[in-house]
Image (cartoon, grey):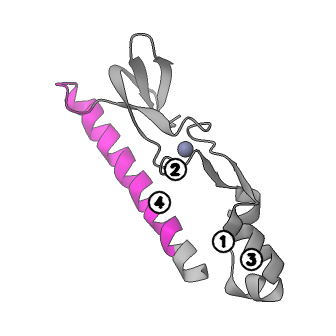
Amino acid sequence: MIDYLVDVDLTTMTGVVELGDDRWAVKVKYEVCPHCSGHGQTTNPAIDGNGISQEQFDDDPEFERDYHSGAYDIECTTCRAQRVVAVPITSLPRDKEMEDAMYSWMREEHVYQQECEAERRAGA
Ligand SMILES: [Zn+2]
């Protein structure tokens, strides 16, 4: 589940966007999970949450093989292996304040994800 989206009701496809102390009722839709890209699984963060260096792989080729074969994969914590997540529909006319808050949240999240990705690449 996306962190800022709470109280999702999948029978009515509605939810509540919660950003800090502000809450807005929204309609939701399904999108491919951004965390696992729809695979339903991710590598256990206990294994690579802090990044993995090439040295670790060089020291332990068996670990590298297992890592790449998915031996350390766990159910995706974002979609819980559903491969999709409910997200707010952003095309609806809505409270401008919420839209601004949501977009700035998403930008931060996006920047964070990019930083993670850059770190992964640097460590790979
Ligand atoms: Zn997922």
Check residue 29 in the rendering and tell me which mark sits there, or answer none. Answer: none
Spot occupied by residue 62 in the image (x, y as percentages of width and height): 82, 77
Kind of residue at disc 4: Tyr
Q: Distance between the residues labelled 1 and 2?
A: 16 Å
Main secondary structure type of the part rendered in magenta: helix
At label 2, the amino acid type is His
Label 3 belongs to which residue?
A: 64
Would you call the spot at circle 4 few (<14 residues within 10 Å), some (14-19), or many (20 or more)? few
Provide the residue designation for mark 1. Answer: 51
88 in relation to 70, above or below: above
The answer to whether the beta carbon of the residue marked 2 is less than 8 Å from any atom of ligand 1 is yes
Of the residues under marks 1 and 2, which one precedes in the sequence? 2
Residue drawn at (74%, 88%) of the image: 55
- How packed mark 2 is, by other alpha carbons closer than 10 Å (few <14, some 14-19, many 20 or more), is many
* Residue that mark 4 sits on: 112
- Between residue 63 and residue 49, name the one nearer to us: 63
Distance from the alpha carbon under mark 1 to that under mark 4: 14 Å
The span picked out in magenta is 90-118
Q: Mark 2 points at which residue?
A: 35
Where does the image place residue 85, in percent across and percent down from the top left? 47, 35
